[in-house]
């Protein structure tokens, strides 16, 4: 059968209508290719994004924990260090209580400072401190304070401020004669009295300048006001009319502070400032656990 004589596809299908089974001529069928559709791999991007999001959450939680831990350590460590310094200064100055003792460890991170070996600046203020019977206040500034107390401190300065109202208790120390008044005048302490010579009363005022004298404070005469005249100390002593009286007025004594302060401290200067008698001391390069902080000098009996 030639190609022209072969039944068409429709004819083949029509053969089924008369009850005969349709025939399929395989010779005329085109080659059929069976192809399986390739299954596309699932996209990995959503999973990777999900994993990145989880890692960011984990990192955020860890960061919060670390920050919270640092804050706790900083807070607890600062409180502990503050109490330790407060106790040490109270012990060194023989204070009965730590009330009225303020400690400032500076604004920098305590952890960072500790890792570098010490604190940059420590400031201590003591409201009430007694110096050989006189009420005063104390201000301490220390730099380069080591964590290890066996190591020396960089610098340490202490100012002991005695109010002018307390200075009046130094009457017997400021002069060998009775005084009518004692007041702070500029950079000096002005004392005054009245001399009786024959039938005359002569008012005398003397300006004393406080100076450091070892472990004591001395008061050196600077100028004298005799009546309405200001004369030198030398002229007052040489004046035969009042020389006998001048000796008792000018015989100043020293005010000892050795029994009230640790021997680690050295008196550098004494000055009158802001209506206070200020004693300036220092203890540079001395370790905090040095025995000199627990030792005190002695003052002569009055």
Image (cartoon, rainbow, N blue to C red):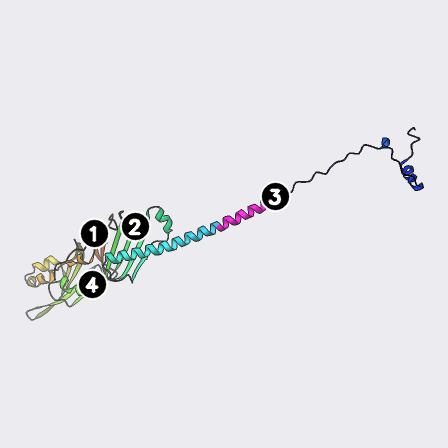
Instruction: Determine whether the residue tagged by mark 2 lies in a helix, strand or loop.
Output: strand
Disc nearer the start of the sequence (2/3): 3
Q: Tell me, for residue 292, which label it has, or none.
A: 1
Q: Quadrant of the C terminus?
A: bottom left
Disc nearer the start of the sequence (2/4): 4
**Label 4 vs label 3: CA separation?**
81 Å
Determine whether label 4 and label 3 are within 8 Å by CB.
no
State the image coordinates of residue 294 (x, y, percent, origin top left).
Answer: 21, 54
Q: Which residue is mark 3?
A: 45
State the image coordinates of residue 71 (x, y, percent, origin top left).
Answer: 41, 53
Instruction: Determine whether the residue tagged by mark 3 lies in a helix, strand or loop.
Output: helix
Disc nearer the start of the sequence (3/1): 3
Q: Tell me, for residue 134, which label it has, or none.
A: 4
Tell me the mark number nearer the camera, choosing from 1 and 4: 1
| Side of 11 where 77 appears, left or right | left
Q: Nearer the viewer, residue 153 or 192?
A: 153
Instruction: Determine whether the residue tagged by mark 1 lies in a helix, strand or loop.
Output: helix
Determine whether label 1 and label 4 are within 8 Å by CB.
no
**Label 3 vs label 1: CA separation?**
72 Å
Callout 2: 10 Å neighbours few (<14), some, many (20+)?
A: some
**Label 2 vs label 3: CA separation?**
58 Å
Q: Is residue 13 above or below residue 245?
A: above
Q: Tell me, for residue 278, which label it has, or none.
A: none
Q: Which residue is mark 2?
A: 143
Q: Is 58 part of what is drawn in magenta?
A: yes
Q: Nearer the viewer, residue 79 or 238?
A: 79
Query: What is the span of residues highlighted in magenta in the rendered image?
Result: 45-61
Q: Nearer the viewer, residue 67 or 62?
A: 62
Tell me the mark number nearer the camera, choosing from 4 and 3: 3
């Amino acid at each position: 059968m030639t190609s022209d004589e072969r039944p068409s596809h429709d004819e083949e299908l029509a053969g089924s209508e008369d009850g005969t089974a349709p025939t399929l001529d395989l010779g005329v069928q085109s080659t059929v290719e069976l192809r399986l559709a390739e299954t596309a791999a699932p996209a990995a991007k959503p999973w990777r994004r999900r994993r990145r999001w989880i890692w960011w959450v984990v990192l955020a939680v860890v960061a919060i924990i670390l920050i919270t831990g640092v804050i706790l350590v900083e807070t607890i460590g600062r409180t502990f260090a503050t109490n330790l310094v407060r106790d040490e200064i109270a012990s060194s100055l023989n204070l009965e209580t730590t009330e009225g003792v303020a400690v400032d460890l500076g604004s920098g991170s305590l952890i960072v400072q500790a890792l570098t070996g010490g604190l940059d600046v420590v400031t201590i203020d003591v409201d009430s401190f007694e110096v050989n019977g006189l009420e005063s206040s104390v201000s301490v500034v220390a730099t380069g304070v080591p964590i290890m107390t066996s190591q020396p401190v960089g610098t340490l300065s202490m100012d002991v401020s005695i109010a002018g109202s307390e200075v009046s208790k130094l009457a017997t120390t400021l002069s060998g004669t009775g005084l009518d008044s004692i007041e702070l005048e500029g950079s000096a302490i002005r004392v005054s009295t009245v001399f009786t010579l024959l039938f005359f009363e002569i008012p005398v005022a003397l300006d004393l300048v406080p100076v450091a004298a070892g472990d004591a404070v001395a008061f050196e005469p600077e100028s004298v006001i005799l009546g309405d005249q200001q004369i030198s100390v030398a002229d007052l002593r040489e004046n035969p009319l009042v020389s006998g009286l001048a000796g008792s007025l000018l015989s100043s004594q020293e005010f000892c502070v050795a029994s009230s302060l640790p021997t680690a401290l050295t008196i550098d200067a004494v000055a009158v400032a802001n209506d206070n008698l200020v004693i300036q001391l220092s203890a540079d390069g001395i370790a905090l656990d040095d025995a000199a902080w627990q030792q005190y000098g002695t003052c002569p009996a009055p």
